[in-house]
Image (tube, rainbow, N blue to C red):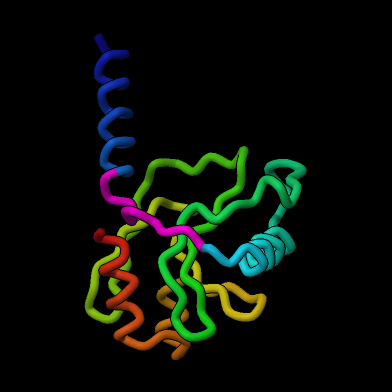
Amino acid sequence: MIKKFISLGVLLIVLFGLSACPKEAGILEDAALEKRIRQDYFERLDNTYGNYKLKDVYIWGYYGTYGDNVAVIMAVHGINMPPAMIEYEIAGLTFWFNTGMEMLIWNNGGFKFLLNAYDEGFLTKEDVEAIYNYTKK
C-alpha cells in the first residue's frame, strides 16, 4: 500500500514538472550557431557526474534570438535532474523551470541565467515578455 502511495506521489511530481515546464520549444535552425552553443556549453561542463563528450550535449529548448542573445535550455544525455521546480519572477512575469534546467541566455560564447541577463541589461523587458509568451505556446 505504501509503495502505491509513493508511486502515485512520484507520478504526480513528474506530471506536474512536465506540465509546468516551458512549452513548445522551437528549433534553432542555424546549424553552425547550434554547434557553437553546444561547444561553449560543453567547455563549461563539470565532468563530476561522468565523462561526457560534445555529442552528449544538446539544446533541449530554443526560445528565440534577441539581438545577439539566444534563449536556450541546455541538457546533457546521461544527467538526470530531480523533478523539483524553481520559480523566478523576472520583469513582473513568473517563470517555472525544472531544477538544473533553467533557461540560459547565450551571448558570444558565454551563458547567463535568464534573471541575470535581464538584470544586467542583456535583455529588455520586451525580450523577457517575448520569451515568456514563447514558453506559454
Q: Is residue 134 magenta?
A: no
State the image coordinates of residue 12 (x, y, percent, origin top left): 25, 32
Q: Main secondary structure of the magenta part?
A: loop
State the image coordinates of residue 57 (x, y, percent, origin top left): 64, 51
Residue at the extreme bottom of the image, as rendered: 121
In the image: residue 48, left or right of residue 91:
right
Give 71 or 117, whichever is nearer the viewer.
71
| Position above or below: 90 against 42 | below
> What residue is at 71 percent from the left and 47 percent from the top?
55
Q: Quadrant of the C terminus?
A: bottom left
Give 65 or 98, whichever is nearer the viewer.
65
How many callouts does the rendering have?
0
> What residue is at 53 percent from the left and 40 percent from the top?
80
Give 28 or 111, whichever is nearer the viewer.
28
> What residue is at 46 percent from the left and 62 percent from the top?
62
State the image coordinates of residue 107 (x, y, percent, origin top left): 58, 79
Q: Quadrant of residue 111?
A: bottom right
| Position above or below: 116 against 62 | below
**Magenta region: which residues?**
19-28
Q: Quadrant of the N terminus?
A: top left
In the image: residue 132, left or right of residue 45:
left
